[in-house]
């Protein structure tokens, strides 16, 4: 049996049982799971192994790439700009970033980016890690990129442009690089071990990744083209690329940090006496902004970037907002119950469809049952 450390409140014991079962069955090699209730931790578990030789235990400070779960950090950071009166979600991005207006992009708004309807789901060309390692270079690529479709007319997931578009707005309006703004305004005040760019000196505590055995089937030519722009998974696994900042997908963290950051949203914007987001902004973020068949993800219901409960992708509760990452990591936030749940693992798993992951569906079902029992 896999060794599991940490603690679990008795009310959340089914989650611990499922966490242990996943490790024992081989669904996970190593992982962490954390839950906060009312801003306080009620679950903080970690277990399994973190290296390819299966010889090093997952430790309390082990971190791992969480891919698109990183987008939650972009969403929260962007909404902080809105609350501070620096960003109007319905104003043209070009109002803040004039060079962006090329190639018919002059009317695109930040709201359209948040709901993956901006017309710029991809770069319009192949992109390498050398490209994204240079922020100015990738910004220039975006400025020169052509529209894929008329903004607002099609939903097509923005796997990578999402973070650069909103991250550049953060840089211009916040006055510092996106990763610095996030660190200063969110990660440090919360004591959250979440990093966009990590020194190679810390590579020893970053868990190895086991690639997924299959990739989802994308029937849409546009969706397939978007997902095919970026090069292989090898660069994500290579420690030399740990310092890369790709806001939509390069976050390195663990479940404890995810749940801690998520508790800001679950607590309606205020935590430990500090107001991060207004209640009005949280309410808007949890209100349907788009519900359509996405060219990459299939049917998707969005708030302001966050996924919302839907028949096609049921959340733990109707009031839970969420997002997840390639291979299985996720963060759920329920402003009604005050519950936030984060999961980070090193076994990547993808079924024929996005979200087709027995770990996610199992945890979410149990989380919903527990939440209903607590109410």
Image: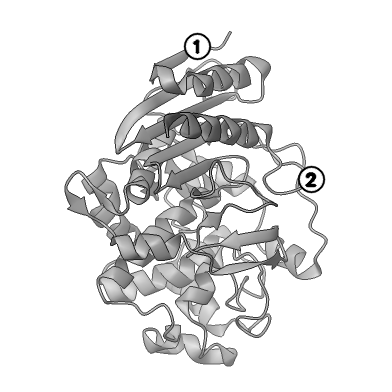
The quarter of the displayed image where residue 12 is located:
top left
Q: Which residue is mark 2?
A: 352
State the separation of the CA atoms marked 2 and 1.
Answer: 31 Å
Question: Is 266 left, or right, of 190 in this rendering?
Answer: right
Foreground residue, 34 or 125?
Answer: 34
Q: Residue at x 16, y 47 (%)?
A: 273
Residue 214 percent location from the top left of the image: 77, 41
The quarter of the displayed image where residue 172 is located:
bottom left
Q: Residue at x 52, y 72 (%)?
A: 113
Comes first in the chain, label 2 or label 1: 1
Please indicate, yes or no, whether residue 164 appears anywhere in the rendered image. Answer: yes
Question: Is 329 left, or right, of 247 in this rendering?
Answer: right
Question: Is 184 left, or right, of 342 in this rendering?
Answer: left
Foreground residue, 54 or 147?
Answer: 147
Question: Is 218 left, or right, of 108 in this rendering?
Answer: right
Residue 108 percent location from the top left of the image: 52, 84
Taking the view exactly as shown, the residue that stands out farthest to the left is 273
Foreground residue, 64 or 153?
Answer: 153
Query: What SS does tag 1 mark?
Result: loop
Q: Residues within 10 Å of mark 1 (few under 14, many from 20)?
A: some
Q: Residue at x 60, y 83 (%)?
A: 151
Q: Which residue is mark 1?
A: 3
Q: Residues within 10 Å of mark 2 (few under 14, many from 20)?
A: few
Foreground residue, 192 or 12?
Answer: 12
Could you tell me which quadrant the C terminus lies in?
A: top left
Foreground tag (2 vs 1): 2
Residue 256 percent location from the top left of the image: 38, 34
Residue 307 percent location from the top left of the image: 55, 55
Colouring style = one colour
């Amino acid at each position: 049996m896999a060794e599991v450390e940490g603690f679990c409140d008795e009310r959340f014991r089914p989650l611990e049982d499922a966490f242990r079962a996943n490790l024992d069955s081989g669904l996970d090699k190593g992982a962490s799971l954390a839950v906060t209730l009312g801003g306080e931790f009620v679950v903080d578990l970690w277990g399994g192994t973190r290296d390819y030789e299966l010889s090093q235990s997952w430790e309390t400070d082990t971190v791992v790439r969480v891919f698109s779960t990183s987008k939650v950090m972009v969403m929260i950071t962007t909404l902080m700009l809105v609350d501070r009166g620096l960003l109007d979600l319905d104003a043209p991005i070009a109002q803040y970033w004039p060079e962006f207006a090329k190639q018919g992009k002059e009317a695109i708004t930040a709201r359209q980016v948040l709901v993956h309807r901006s017309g710029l789901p991809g770069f319009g060309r192949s992109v390498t890690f050398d490209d994204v390692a240079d922020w100015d270079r990738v910004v220039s690529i975006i400025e020169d990129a052509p529209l894929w479709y008329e903004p607002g007319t099609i939903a097509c997931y923005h796997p990578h442009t999402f973070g650069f578009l909103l991250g550049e707005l953060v840089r211009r309006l916040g006055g510092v690089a996106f990763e610095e703004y996030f660190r200063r305004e969110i990660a440090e005040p919360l004591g959250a071990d979440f990093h966009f760019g990590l020194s190679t000196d810390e590579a020893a505590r970053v868990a190895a990744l086991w690639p997924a055995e299959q990739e989802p089937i994308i029937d849409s030519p546009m969706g397939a083209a978007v997902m095919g722009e970026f090069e292989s998974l090898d660069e994500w696994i290579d420690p030399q690329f740990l310092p890369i900042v790709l806001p939509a997908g390069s976050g390195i963290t663990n479940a404890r940090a995810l749940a801690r950051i998520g508790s800001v949203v679950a607590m309606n914007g205020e935590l430990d006496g500090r107001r991060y987001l207004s209640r009005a902004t949280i309410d808007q973020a949890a209100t349907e902004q788009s519900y359509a068949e996405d060219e990459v993800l299939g049917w998707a219901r969005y708030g302001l970037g966050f996924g919302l409960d839907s028949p096609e992708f049921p959340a733990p509760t109707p009031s839970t907002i969420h997002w997840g990452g390639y291979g299985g990591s996720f963060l759920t936030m329920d402003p009604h119950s005050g519950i936030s749940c984060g999961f980070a693992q090193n076994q990547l798993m993808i079924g024929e469809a996005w979200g087709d992951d027995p770990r996610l569906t199992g945890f979410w079902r149990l989380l919903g049952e527990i939440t209903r029992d607590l109410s």
